[in-house]
């Protein structure tokens, strides 16, 4: 710059103005991320997410798709396939799709090893938890950028700006992001699908006869659909809709060609994982296919209870129960979740806008394709999933609902001259309503950065060290929060079986040095399981529950023939440790 006048011109009208806008947006994003995470991040909240974090850590260490969590169900299934339990060989992960864990593994691979040995001091959290948070934040802002890009491609900069800002201040999406569920990864993939679809529409409009570029775009669409399937199996439903779109959109011999390319690329991308599962356990989806017959919250079909049964038999599929699960989920999705998924007022604009036909036929086709994806996922996901997953279609499709809602919002604004003259104020009013819940959350006082009870990193780390120092190397540990114990304690653990006889059977292969019981067990009503005591013994082959052991927690006198028969050690107000005295060093 020769003088200050040129500098001012560069900042106001030249390239400097663009860089200043980018710097302002980046600074605002970093500030919002810091404040919201500081106030609302509390570590990993559920066993399901921790299972995937443990898998990611194993992949990063070069252990492959294995897990530190020994589920009784996996134990029984692998035994049936002729693979006996061995302390030197970890069990394969059989319950989850792999992509979120692989994404975390990429982050874990570059973390310093010292971070894993760091012990958190409340109210701060654990270093690797923050690493997963950072990954989710990066994915969240990548999704915001993809929403802006798609809005500009389909509409204009006004729609792109309003949609991306509305998404960036949506509390439901922020809640999912700081809960580390992996929802931002799903949002990125869904937005990538429709960015590619919009690009394909442009190509088909300008070049009606499919060429090499069109084939590559269809192949890319198939890759995004395959990655959605590998994030969560029910997400693969999007491939059915995109395949139907191609069948309707393309005519003649090109239809067969493009559908063949789409199907070939999709199956090529998912086949390695499906083949791996088939070789390991005999089913392309591992044990996750059983989610069809399971329902979280149903005492007769609880997914966690199924994992904790030492049986290779699959749960029976009750058609009536499946129908009830699916229809109930559909009702909740359509009545509640779609409205609370992040769009708020813009959801209403999206639904009202379905009756409007945009001038650009390309926008109409992409919108109706999205509407079909939304309907299929809202209807199909409740049937296919068990209800444990927090990644729901109403949330990961919210950015697209917001985008098309913003598109129709500006149609209404532009139809009124007074609104057109003051569209910025009208848009600001809508965004202000969208922002109010976020402001409330950001004003909350800071709390401890982990979910306690039952997850207390320091306790699990101490348990791991205590197991190494107190017990012989062959001793195992069981708990009712196995994924949390494995994640924070970085140790191999058994999930507490549902039946006492399963626990006894497992102890034949690996004697248990300790059993950790947390509020997951102690805070639930288990009075029906309290068995009548006859002397100091219990029936170790009983098909029922743990009544005799639970009674011992109250009387502080464990059954004499129960291996962990020392008086229970009260670690906290609602955490108890049972110890096997015969395995001490």
Image (cartoon, rainbow, N blue to C red):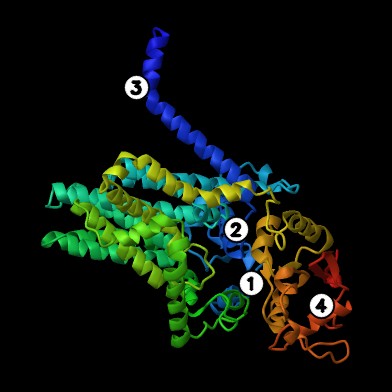
Task: Please determine whether, in this image, residue 319 is positioned above or below residue 462.
Answer: below
Q: Is residue 128 left or right of residue 3?
A: right
Say whether disc 1 or disc 4 marks the residue closer to the N-terminus: 1
* CB contact under 8 Å: marks 3 and 2: no
Q: Which residue is mark 4?
A: 563
* CB contact under 8 Å: marks 3 and 4: no
Q: Can residue 90 be seen here? A: no
Which residue is at the front of the view, 367 or 51?
367
How far apart are labels 3 and 4 at the CA level?
Answer: 78 Å
Which residue is at the front of the view, 236 or 187?
187
Classed neighbour count for the residue bearing mark 3: other residues with Cα under 10 Å, few (<14), some (14–19), many (≥20): few
Mark drawn on residue 13: 3
Task: Please determine whether, in this image, residue 19 is positioned above or below residue 238.
Answer: above
Classed neighbour count for the residue bearing mark 4: other residues with Cα under 10 Å, few (<14), some (14–19), many (≥20): many
Classed neighbour count for the residue bearing mark 2: other residues with Cα under 10 Å, few (<14), some (14–19), many (≥20): many
Say whether disc 2 or disc 1 marks the residue closer to the N-terminus: 2
* CB contact under 8 Å: marks 2 and 1: no
Rendered location of residue 385, percent (x, y): 47, 72
Which part of the image, by quadrant, shows the N terminus?
top left
Which residue is at the front of the view, 186 or 214?
186
Say whether disc 3 or disc 1 marks the residue closer to the N-terminus: 3
Count of residue discs: 4
Say whether disc 3 or disc 4 marks the residue closer to the N-terminus: 3
Q: Secondary structure at mark 1?
A: loop
Eye-nearest disc, 3 or 1: 3
Mark drawn on residue 54: 2
Give the residue furthest to the front: 418
Q: Secondary structure at mark 2?
A: helix
Rendered residue at 47%/79% (across/down)? 325
Q: Can residue 54 be seen here? A: yes
Q: Is residue 223 left or right of residue 122?
A: left
How far apart are labels 3 and 2 at the CA level?
Answer: 51 Å
């Amino acid at each position: 710059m020769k003088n200050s006048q040129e500098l001012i011109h560069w900042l106001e009208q030249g390239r400097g103005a663009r860089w200043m806008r980018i710097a302002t947006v980046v600074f605002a994003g970093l500030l919002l991320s810091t404040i919201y995470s500081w106030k609302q991040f509390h570590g990993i909240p559920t066993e399901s997410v921790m299972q995937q974090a443990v898998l990611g850590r194993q992949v990063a260490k070069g252990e492959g798709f294995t897990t530190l969590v020994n589920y009784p169900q996996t134990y029984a299934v692998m035994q049936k396939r002729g693979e006996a339990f061995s302390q030197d060989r970890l069990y394969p992960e059989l319950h989850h799709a792999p992509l979120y864990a692989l994404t975390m593994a990429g982050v874990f691979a570059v973390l310093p090893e010292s971070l894993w040995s760091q012990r958190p001091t409340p109210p701060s959290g654990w270093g690797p938890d923050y690493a997963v948070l950072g990954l989710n934040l990066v994915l969240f802002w990548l999704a915001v950028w993809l929403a802006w890009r798609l809005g500009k491609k389909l509409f204009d900069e006004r729609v792109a700006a309003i949609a991306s800002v509305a998404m960036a201040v949506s509390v439901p999406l922020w809640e999912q992001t700081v809960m580390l569920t992996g929802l931002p990864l799903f949002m990125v993939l869904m937005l990538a699908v429709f960015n590619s679809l919009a690009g394909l529409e442009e190509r088909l409009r300008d070049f009606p006869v499919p060429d090499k570029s069109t084939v590559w775009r269809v192949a890319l669409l198939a890759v995004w659909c395959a990655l959605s399937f590998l994030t969560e199996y029910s997400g693969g439903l999007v491939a059915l809709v995109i395949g139907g779109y191609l069948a309707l959109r393309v005519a003649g011999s090109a239809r067969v060609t493009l559908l063949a390319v789409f199907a070939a690329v999709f199956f090529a991308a998912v086949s390695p994982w499906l083949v791996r599962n088939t070789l390991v356990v005999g089913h392309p989806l591992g044990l996750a296919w059983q989610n069809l017959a399971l329902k979280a919250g149903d005492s007769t079909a609880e997914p966690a209870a199924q994992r904790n049964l030492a049986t290779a038999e699959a749960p029976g599929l009750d058609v009536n129960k499946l129908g009830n699960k699916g229809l109930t989920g559909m009702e909740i999705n359509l009545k509640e979740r779609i409205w609370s998924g992040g769009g708020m007022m813009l959801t209403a604009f999206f639904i009202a806008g379905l009756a409007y036909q945009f001038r650009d036929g390309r926008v109409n086709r992409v919108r109706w394709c999205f509407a079909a994806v939304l309907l299929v996922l809202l209807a199909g996901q409740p049937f296919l999933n068990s209800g444990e997953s927090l990644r729901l279609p109403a949330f990961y499709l919210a950015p697209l609902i917001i985008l098309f809602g913003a598109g129709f919002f500006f149609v209404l604004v532009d139809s009124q001259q007074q609104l057109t003259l003051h569209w910025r104020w009208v848009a600001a009013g809508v965004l202000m309503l969208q922002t109010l819940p976020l402001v409330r959350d950001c004003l909350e006082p800071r709390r401890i950065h982990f979910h306690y009870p039952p997850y207390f990193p320091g306790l699990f780390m101490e348990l791991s060290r205590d197991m190494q120092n107190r017990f012989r190397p062959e001793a195992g540990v069981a708990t009712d929060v196995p994924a949390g114990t494995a994640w924070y304690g970085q140790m191999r653990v058994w999930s507490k079986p549902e039946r006492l006889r399963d626990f006894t059977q497992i102890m034949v292969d690996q004697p248990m040095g300790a059993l950790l019981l947390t509020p997951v067990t102690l805070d639930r009503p288990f009075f029906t399981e309290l068995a009548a005591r006859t002397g100091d013994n219990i029936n170790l082959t009983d098909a029922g529950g743990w009544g005799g052991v639970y009674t011992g927690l109250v009387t502080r006198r464990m059954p004499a023939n129960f291996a962990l028969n020392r008086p229970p050690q009260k670690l906290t107000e609602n955490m108890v440790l049972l110890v096997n005295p015969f395995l001490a060093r």
